[in-house]
């Protein structure tokens, strides 16, 4: 190995360890900066969502398997963790709470071992339909097998009754936050390391060209099955942490909505890059909490955001960021930012008109007999007033008429900046 190669390898190692150490420091000091109970709860939910989204990306982003039933392994991990906590507390076994997520992880792994061999025989539509069928099967079983799943009420546990280490009761939310943060960091490092192994490379090859993988002597089915088992293990850890956080596991853990949320998080964040699902998990968790306080039809906006990402930014938020990287490194972000500033105002007007239209239409179709004065996004308006309709139509039409050429201008500015960056040797 030449001196240049050794220096390059040393620099890469320093960046690798530097990123994870910096992340650990941020996780450590975060409760010092945001100490309120709601902030700690939000951070805990984000940590759980990050593990869940990264586990899902082992399937979708890394191996090319679109699953509609990933919540099966998340939910079963949560239920086994809750039952494990009750058994440990009743038997007074010396098992501390920080080890309970492993129960969920091995539960997810066990069910992935049992269900994965058949599921992963084919990828594409066949795998997606099998995962959907399994999700419906397990989800409906949650309401039938009441002795295990607890029916609609679910199964509860008391996390403070377990064996204590260093006198930690895990009653205060800050202790749960640190537990979730620790597991999120460990799981993220483990899943990142998985992407750097020969198995991780082979998963990418199976995603891109399974026939060629088979031609060189590997079985794509076995590769998909191993990736599926890893994914189930980490999804089970996320489910167990969720069960510890809420001290309950119920049928919602196994529902289609849970599978949809993790799909949204991974895709909106970007499935092509490792940090994409992390961004998506943060974005989706925070947005779902914020939107639910602003409007009663927040799920509708959630769906619209997902459609917008699929249509306009199929690489997700991470993909958009990486497209700007060569422009930024070449020092050509100035003209691009100016073009964004030009497009911002008409785009905001268009979005405001769409929001106003949605709120008015929803009120007249769902709550037509209620008071026409409604409050959404911090504003009160009269849905029966012609002025409201006129304002919504004006904002949509004028905003669209101005935003369209403005975004064409943005496209030209970005193309010119990208050409200049390539001329300097910075490739996208």
Image (cartoon, rainbow, N blue to C red):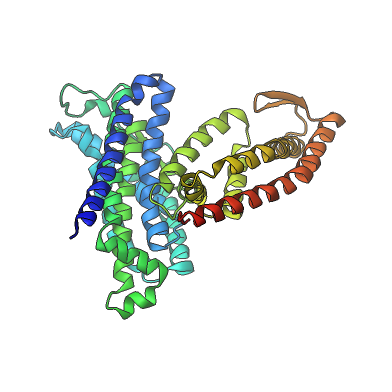
Q: In this view, does 210 lie above or below 372?
A: below
Horizontal side, residue 61 vs residue 215: left or right: right
Q: In this view, does 36 lie above or below 192?
A: above
Q: Position of residue 36 (x, y in %)?
A: 41, 19
- How many numbered callouts? 0
Q: Position of residue 413 (x, y in %)?
A: 63, 49
Where is residue 157, by image quadrant? Answer: top left
Q: Which one is in front, 412 or 159?
A: 412
Residue 186 appears in the picture as rendered: yes
Give the residue displayed 32% in from the left and 35% down from the top. 23
Give the residue displayed 38% in from the left and 50% down from the top. 274
Where is residue 114, by image quadrant? Answer: bottom left
Q: Is residue 76 above or below residue 296?
A: below
Q: In this view, does 110 lie above or below 371?
A: below
Q: Which one is in front, 418 or 160?
A: 418
Residue 247 appears in the picture as rendered: no
Q: Which one is in front, 406 or 3?
A: 3
């Amino acid at each position: 190995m030449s001196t240049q190669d050794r220096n390059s390898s040393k620099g890469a190692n320093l960046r690798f360890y530097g990123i994870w150490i910096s992340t650990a420091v941020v996780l450590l000091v975060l409760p010092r900066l945001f100490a309120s109970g709601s902030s700690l709860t939000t951070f805990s939910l984000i940590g759980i969502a990050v593990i869940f989204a990264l586990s899902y990306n082992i399937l979708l982003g890394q191996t090319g398997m679109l699953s509609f039933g990933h919540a099966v392994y998340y939910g079963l991990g949560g239920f086994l963790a809750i039952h494990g906590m009750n058994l440990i507390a009743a038997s007074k076994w010396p098992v501390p709470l920080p080890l309970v997520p492993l129960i969920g992880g091995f539960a997810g792994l066990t069910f992935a071992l049992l269900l994965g061999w058949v599921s992963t025989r084919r990828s594409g539509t066949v795998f997606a339909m099998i995962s959907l069928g399994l999700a419906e099967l397990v989800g409906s079983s949650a309401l039938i097998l009441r002795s295990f799943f607890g029916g609609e009420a679910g199964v509860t546990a008391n996390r403070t009754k377990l064996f204590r280490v260093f006198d930690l009761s895990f009653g205060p939310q800050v202790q749960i936050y640190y537990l979730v943060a620790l597991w999120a960091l460990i799981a993220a490092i483990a899943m990142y390391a998985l992407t750097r192994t020969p198995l991780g490379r082979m998963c990418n090859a199976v995603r891109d060209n399974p026939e060629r993988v088979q031609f060189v002597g590997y079985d794509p089915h076995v590769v998909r099955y191993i990736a599926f088992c890893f994914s189930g293990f980490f999804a089970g850890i996320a489910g167990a942490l969720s069960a510890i956080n809420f001290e309950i596991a119920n049928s919602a853990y196994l529902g289609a909505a849970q599978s949809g949320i993790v799909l949204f998080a991974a895709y909106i964040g970007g499935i092509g890059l490792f940090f994409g699902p992390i961004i998506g998990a943060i974005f989706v968790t925070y947005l779902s909490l914020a939107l639910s306080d602003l409007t009663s039809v927040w799920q509708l906006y959630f769906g619209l955001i997902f459609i917008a990402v699929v249509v306009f930014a199929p690489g997700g938020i991470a993909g958009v960021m990486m497209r700007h990287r060569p422009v930024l490194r070449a020092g050509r972000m100035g003209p691009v930012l100016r073009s964004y500033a030009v497009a911002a105002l008409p785009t905001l007007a268009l979005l405001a008109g769409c929001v106003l239209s949605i709120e008015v239409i929803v009120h007249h179709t769902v709550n037509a007999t209620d008071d026409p004065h409604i409050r959404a996004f911090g504003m009160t308006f009269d849905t029966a007033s012609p002025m409201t309709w006129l304002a919504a139509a004006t904002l949509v039409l004028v905003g669209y008429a101005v935003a369209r050429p403005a975004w064409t201008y943005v496209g030209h500015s970005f193309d010119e900046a990208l050409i200049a960056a390539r001329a300097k040797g910075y490739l996208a």
